[in-house]
C-alpha cells in the first residue's frame, strides 16, 4: 500500500471524505499519505487553532498590538488555508468566538473590548483566506452574523482569484450591498444559488443574479413579505439565460410572482411550496407553457386550482417521472394524472378514500415504482394491501403510508402476514420498502404482534423498513 501512486491515493481518500476519523489516521502513515489526505481534510476548515497559526507575522503583530497574543510553538507543516474549497462564514465566526472566549478564560478575563477584538481577528483571518485560497467552490453566508455589516472580505487582496470559480453560494438577502456588488464583478458562473429572502433585500443581490451565465439550480426561500422582491429580483431573474434545470421556491404564506418561470424552458425539476392556494394565482400564466424536459414536479403544501393543474399536466405530463401533491380527493384530477402522466414512477398525494382510484393508477401507470398514500380516519390498510398485491405493476417496490388526523389503524397480524406472503410470491421477486409516517398518531403497524410480523419478514428479506 505504501507504494501506491499519488493519483490512486487521491481517489481512495475522496471516498473517505465523510469519515474524518479514518481520514485523519492516514496522516500518520508517511509524508506522501499525509500530503494527500490533508487536502481532503481541509476542504473545509476543521481546526481554528491551526488556521490561526497560519496567520502571517505582520498580522500577528497587528493583533498583538491590540491585545490578542498568538503563541505559535512551531511553523505549520502545510499551507492549510490553500486547501479550502468550502467556506461557511457563520461557522468560522462561531469558531473564532470560541477561540477568543478560551483566550479570555486563559488570561483570567484580561481580554477587554471583546467585540472589537472579534472584529479585528476575523478581519485578519479573512485576509489570510482571501490571499491563500486558490479556488473556493462553495460559500455559505447565512443567518445572523455581525460580519454581514462589518467584514467586506470580497474586497481583500486575492479575493478575485479566490472567488472567481465559485460554483455554489448560500446567502441571505440582507447582507451588505457591497458584498453583492463586488461578487457580481468576480463571480458570474455560479451553478447553484440558494437565497433566503429576509425583511431587507440588499440592492446588489439583483445585480448578482442578473450577471449569472450558467446557473443550473436556484433555491428561493421567502420567510417575510418582501415588497422589494417583486420589481428588482423578478426582473433580474428574467435576465438569466435559459440554463436553469432545477427551481425550488418556498413562499409559505407569502406571494411570489411566478410568471418568470415560463422563461426557463429547460427546467427539469420544479418545486413550489405555498401554504395558501391564493399564492398560485400566477399559475394561470403557466398552465399552457410547455417544459419539454420537466420530469419532476412537486407541490409541498397546497397546489394550484385543479383546472389549472390539469391543463399544465396536459402539456407537461408525458415526461413526468416524479409528481408530488398533497392529499388530493378530486377524482377529475386523479383521472387527469392517469391520462396525462403515463410514465410516472414516483407518485405522492393519494388518499385512502377510494381504493378503486388506487387500482386505476396501478393499471394506468405501468411504470409506477413508489407511491405515497395519505391515510385518513376510517381507512383500511388491508384494502390498500389487497389492491397492491392484485394490481401493482412489476416495477412497484416502495409504499409510504402517511397517517393523518389521528387515524386508528386496524390491521391484524394475520392480514399483515398474508400480504407479505403474497408479496413474496410475486414475479419478479423484489423486497418491498415500507415507510410508515405516523405523525404522532397511533399505528398498530409499529406495535404488538404486527411489529413481530414485520421483524420476521425483514429478516427473511421480503420487506425493508425505512424511516
Image (cartoon, rainbow, N blue to C red):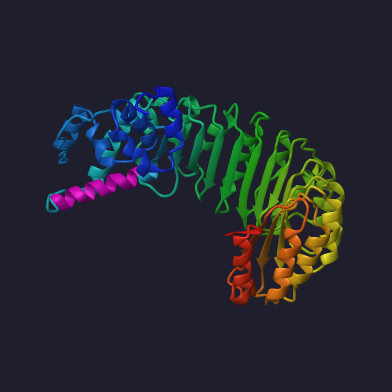
Residue 43 location in percent, x, y? 39, 34
Q: Is residue 151 above or below residue 155?
A: below
Residue 162 location in percent, x, y? 41, 26
Classify the position of the N terminus by image quarter: top left
Identity of the residue drawn at 15% across and 41% down? 67
Magenta stretch contains residue 98: yes
User: Is residue 147 at least partly visible in the picture?
Assistant: no
User: Is residue 27 at least partly visible in the picture?
Assistant: yes
Quarter occupied by residue 411? bottom right
In this rendering, position of residue 321 left or right of residue 216: right
- Viewer-closest of 243 and 145: 243
In this rendering, position of residue 42 left or right of residue 105: right
Q: Which residues are magenta?
A: 92-106
Classify the position of the C terminus by image quarter: bottom right
Identity of the residue drawn at 58% across and 71% down? 440
Quarter occupied by residue 159? top left
Question: Looking at the magenta stretch, what is its main secondary structure?
Answer: helix
- Viewer-closest of 284 and 367: 367
In this rendering, position of residue 45 left or right of residue 56: right
In this rendering, position of residue 104 left or right of residue 452: left
- Viewer-closest of 113 and 134: 134
Magenta stretch contains residue 312: no
Q: Is residue 164 above or below residue 25?
A: above
Residue 255 location in percent, x, y? 65, 52
Q: Is residue 459 above or below residue 178?
A: below
Amino acid at each position: 500500500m505504501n507504494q501506491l501512486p499519488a493519483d490512486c491515493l487521491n481517489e481512495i481518500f475522496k471516498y473517505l471524505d465523510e469519515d474524518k476519523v479514518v481520514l485523519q489516521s492516514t496522516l500518520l502513515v508517511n509524508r506522501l499519505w499525509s500530503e494527500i489526505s490533508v487536502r481532503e481534510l481541509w476542504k473545509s476548515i476543521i481546526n481554528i487553532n491551526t488556521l490561526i497559526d497560519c496567520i502571517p507575522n505582520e498580522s500577528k503583530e497587528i493583533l498583538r498590538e491590540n491585545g490578542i497574543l498568538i503563541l505559535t510553538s512551531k511553523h505549520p507543516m502545510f499551507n492549510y488555508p490553500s486547501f479550502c474549497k468550502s467556506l461557511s462564514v457563520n461557522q468560522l465566526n462561531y469558531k473564532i468566538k470560541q477561540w477568543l472566549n478560551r483566550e479570555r478564560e486563559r488570561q483570567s478575563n484580561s481580554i477587554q473590548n471583546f467585540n472589537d477584538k472579534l472584529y479585528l481577528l476575523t478581519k485578519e483571518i479573512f485576509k489570510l483566506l482571501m490571499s491563500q485560497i486558490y479556488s473556493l467552490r462553495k460559500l455559505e453566508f447565512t443567518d445572523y452574523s455581525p460580519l454581514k455589516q462589518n467584514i467586506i472580505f470580497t474586497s481583500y487582496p486575492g479575493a478575485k482569484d479566490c472567488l472567481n470559480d465559485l460554483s455554489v453560494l448560500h446567502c441571505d438577502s440582507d447582507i451588505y450591498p457591497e458584498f453583492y456588488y463586488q461578487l457580481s464583478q468576480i463571480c458570474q458562473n455560479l451553478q447553484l444559488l440558494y437565497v433566503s429572502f429576509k425583511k431587507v433585500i440588499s440592492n446588489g443581490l439583483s445585480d448578482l443574479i442578473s450577471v449569472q451565465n450558467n446557473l443550473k439550480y436556484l433555491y428561493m426561500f421567502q420567510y417575510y413579505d418582501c415588497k422589494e422582491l417583486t420589481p428588482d429580483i423578478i426582473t433580474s431573474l428574467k435576465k438569466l439565460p435559459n440554463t436553469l434545470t432545477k427551481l425550488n421556491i418556498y413562499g409559505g404564506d407569502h406571494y411570489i410572482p411566478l410568471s418568470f418561470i415560463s422563461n426557463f424552458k429547460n427546467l427539469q425539476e420544479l418545486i413550489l411550496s405555498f401554504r395558501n392556494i391564493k399564492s398560485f394565482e400566477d399559475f394561470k400564466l403557466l398552465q399552457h407553457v410547455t417544459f419539454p424536459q420537466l420530469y419532476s414536479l412537486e407541490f409541498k403544501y397546497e397546489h394550484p386550482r385543479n383546472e389549472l393543474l390539469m391543463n399544465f399536466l396536459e402539456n407537461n405530463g408525458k415526461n413526468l417521472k416524479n409528481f408530488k401533491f398533497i392529499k388530493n380527493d378530486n377524482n377529475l384530477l386523479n383521472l387527469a394524472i392517469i391520462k396525462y402522466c403515463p410514465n410516472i414512477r414516483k407518485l405522492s398525494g393519494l388518499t385512502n378514500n377510494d381504493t378503486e382510484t388506487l387500482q386505476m393508477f396501478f393499471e394506468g401507470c405501468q411504470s409506477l415504482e413508489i407511491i405515497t398514500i395519505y391515510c385518513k380516519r376510517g381507512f383500511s390498510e388491508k384494502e390498500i394491501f389487497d389492491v397492491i398485491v392484485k394490481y401493482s405493476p412489476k416495477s412497484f417496490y416502495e409504499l409510504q403510508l402517511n397517517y393523518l388526523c389521528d387515524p386508528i389503524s386496524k390491521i391484524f397480524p394475520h392480514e399483515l402476514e398474508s400480504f407479505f406472503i403474497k408479496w413474496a410470491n410475486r414475479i419478479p421477486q423484489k423486497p418491498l420498502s415500507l415507510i410508515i409516517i405516523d405523525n404522532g398518531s397511533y399505528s398498530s403497524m409499529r406495535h404488538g404482534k404486527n411489529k413481530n410480523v414485520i421483524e420476521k419478514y425483514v429478516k427473511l428479506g421480503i420487506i425493508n423498513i425505512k424511516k
